[in-house]
Amino acid sequence: MEITEDKVGKQILLLGNEAITRGALEAGIDVATTYPGTPSTEIADTFSKIAKQATKQNKDPGFYFEYSTNEKVALEVSAAASFCGLRALTCMKHVGLNVASDVLMTYLYVGCKGGHIIVSADDPYCHSSQNEQDNRYFALFGNAPMLEPTTPQEAKEMTRRGFDVSEELQLPILLRTTTRLNHARGTITLRKLQKPRGKGHFEKDPLLALVPVSARVKHPALLKKMEQAKKISEKSPFNTILSIGKPTDIGIVASGVSVNYVKEVAGTLKLDVKILKLGMTHPIPRKMCEQFIKSCNTIVVVEELEPILEQQFKTLAYDINSDVKIYGKSTDHFSRLYEYSPDIVADAFSKIFKVKNPFQKPVQPKLKLPSRPPSLCPGCPHRATYYAVKKAAPKGTIYPTDIGCYTLGKAPPLEIADLLLCMGSNAGIACGLSISTEQKIVSFMGDSTFFHSGIPPIVDAVHHNHDVVITVLDNRTTAMTGLQPHPGTEYDGMGRPAKLINVEDVIKGLGVEHIEIVDPNKIKETTAAFKRALDFRGPAVVVSKSPCILLESQRKRKSREKKSVYCIDQEKCNQCKVCIVRFGCPAFYYAEEGGIYIDELQCNGCGNCVQICPFDAIFKKEGNK
Amino acid sequence: MNCKTSIVLTGVGGQGVITAATALGKAAVRGKINVYASEIHGMAQRSGAVICTVRIGDVLCPLIATGTADVILSTEPVEALRNITYASKKTKIITDINPVIPFTIAIGGVEYPNLDDVFKEMRSYAELFLIDASKIAKKSGDVITKNIVMLGALAATDVLPFKSEILLETILDNVPSKYKDINKKAFEGGMEAIKNLGFSP
């Protein structure tokens, strides 16, 4: 594997996320934990890939890695490793840090021992998320030193050096990234791999158990550490001033991926500016920033989402009685919404500096183009479950859903996603609806989500006897993020055998009295099971069990099993369109000359369409692939 | 070195767009030229629209400003037009001519536009190269190599700041030996298709 090569100075192409993993390897990582979530996933998947390969060869990868049950557990496992003096990394998507925030807030009081990097992968524009919260606030909120890389190369360096900073301060470091860093590819220069520490030792200390007395000691200690962090920030190589063009009193302040756009656009617009590039953004290097303000008469702050640097610069300017003019979000030149681009930065600069924007205005095609949203795969067992539910449930039934592939059931024709907030929310929302309306409720969550945070609301439903139907769509994997294992699989993230926890065993243990276990590919039986669940007064849980079709296709490829495909007998087809307008399998299409056909390349051979066709027009044909 | 090459790669999830973008990036590293690329992953596997940008040379950011792409390389005609904002008169649009009909059309309410209209509109913005990449890929041995056909087509133009051999070697280095032959054929088929359109760098 190129990423584990110990060739100092070699240049390789890496994804920002892979660069973070490489940085951790160069720092001698001992323990890495995660709960998968776009755009953070490849950091963990790379650890997993390396560990699996080692397991296969009966070797020790040198580090421990796990896909934890959720982000909170992930952070706890890593924090404990750090308490024993080991180096740890925890990565998650931005909303994952909400789940882990209960740990984070007090962990910062306690402090760490071995270096610990917490990666937050934020998602401006919500490319694959339910919100675009700015997790830099967590650094300010909890007093976490924060690093924000601009390029994949810098992501690697910040990760590597971040461990040293973390150990110097005895504080975990927040490495805050965004999609355009996580999923950028760039050239990386390799440094030496460091040997991990192996096993650590836990030194007992009464102040590590946070009760009020110790918390009152630890809070001022944390603030003192942050004073020390300010000194580190002043000298940090990640905070630099770059000059473009002639000497000038125009300054740009930027961090993260925005620095890329600023540099590119300043060059294109032929501006004379100096750029204060902040890499360590909490705490900011106060003296350096004050000097910068004093050397400028105009400052433009370029940062995606919230005006966090902008507000700090305004405060600094006020404190030193500077009359520097600060442009940014408060002057409406930049938005608090979505992600930035060279065009957006050029547009703002052209207005502020009164120069021509060299880039043409964005154009939309004149022709009306069909949208191409992602959809449930052909053969996806969720489609069969949804179809059965729609058959069984009365009109007006509310469908709270959750985070995963099955959220794609929101799209027509299934339209079976009415409410969605966050991981695990389906069942809690279902409970609340059951006491607030007479409408029937069927909620959905995946198996990975069930373990992540779906269990407590089921407990609530049982204890209070809420009249709800909660569905666990058990497809044997964490599908949406790329088929990662979870507590319900018989192997772990290092490719080793693991104890499989059965969803239905857990549900039985919770005291659910009405449990239905179905194979959704048997649509009639599944429909009947949902009808029984809906008739039951009180909480009913349906476990709909069938492996993800991508997992199945993978298995078939490996075992060289033939994939069967299905065809439509045009003689029998009555063009009732149930397969398209109700079932919605994307392998079906209308041919130009008329008639409905199945695209054999797309068909994954689930055969569920045979069951839903009222005219028995669909038949199995042995495929070649 | 003083060059900047900006390429938009687009298509439908599952067509190998990200693989093609990665090969292009790795080829640049092999040719010892700076490269900076960006991709959107999230839902790429589930038949959604995919877009990657690859920038090679003296570039400081991975995203491409409107109207500044040198090439828009697309494995699907409508996806090429969808990204027309990156094109100018100097841009070369190279696209496969075979539509992938989105499922939204089967359900109703929208239509896949007439292909001649799609091509006409693209021609009004940029220089258009149409190739039947699916046919070439099939002829090479597997329709899955369509993305490699497209890379061959790209290499046959004069936009890449490194030799086409470097790109081909990179592609072949990253596939198992039993697939090397069909990938080579696909790449060469793509190159030939552009040359047959009368393009000579």
Image (tube, coloured by chain):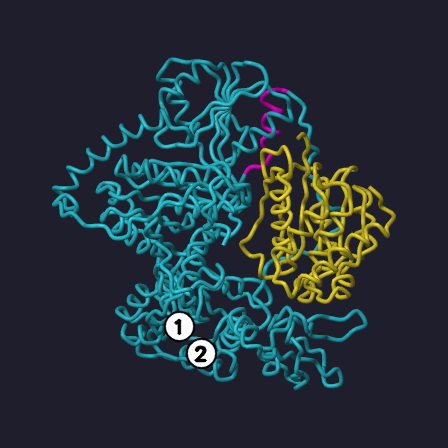
**Mark 2: amino acid:** Phe
A112 is within the stretch colored magenta: no
User: In this picture, which residue range is highlighted in magenta?
Assistant: A340-354
Closer to the camera in the image, A238 or B23: B23
Which residue is nearer to you in this view: A352 or A22?
A22
Q: Position of residue B111 (x, y in %)?
A: 74, 60
Name the residue carrying label 1: A469
Chain to which mark 1 belongs:
A
Q: Secondary structure at mark 1?
A: strand
Task: Please identify the quarter of the rendering in which residue B179 is found.
Answer: bottom right
**Residue sitting at x 51%, y 25%:** A331
Which residue is denoted by mark 2 in the rendering?
A: A530
Kindly indicate which chain is depicted in yellow in the rendered structure: B
A344 magenta-colored: yes
Q: How many marks?
A: 2
Relative horizontal placement of residue A271, taking residue A159 as reference (left or right): right
The color chain A is rendered in: cyan
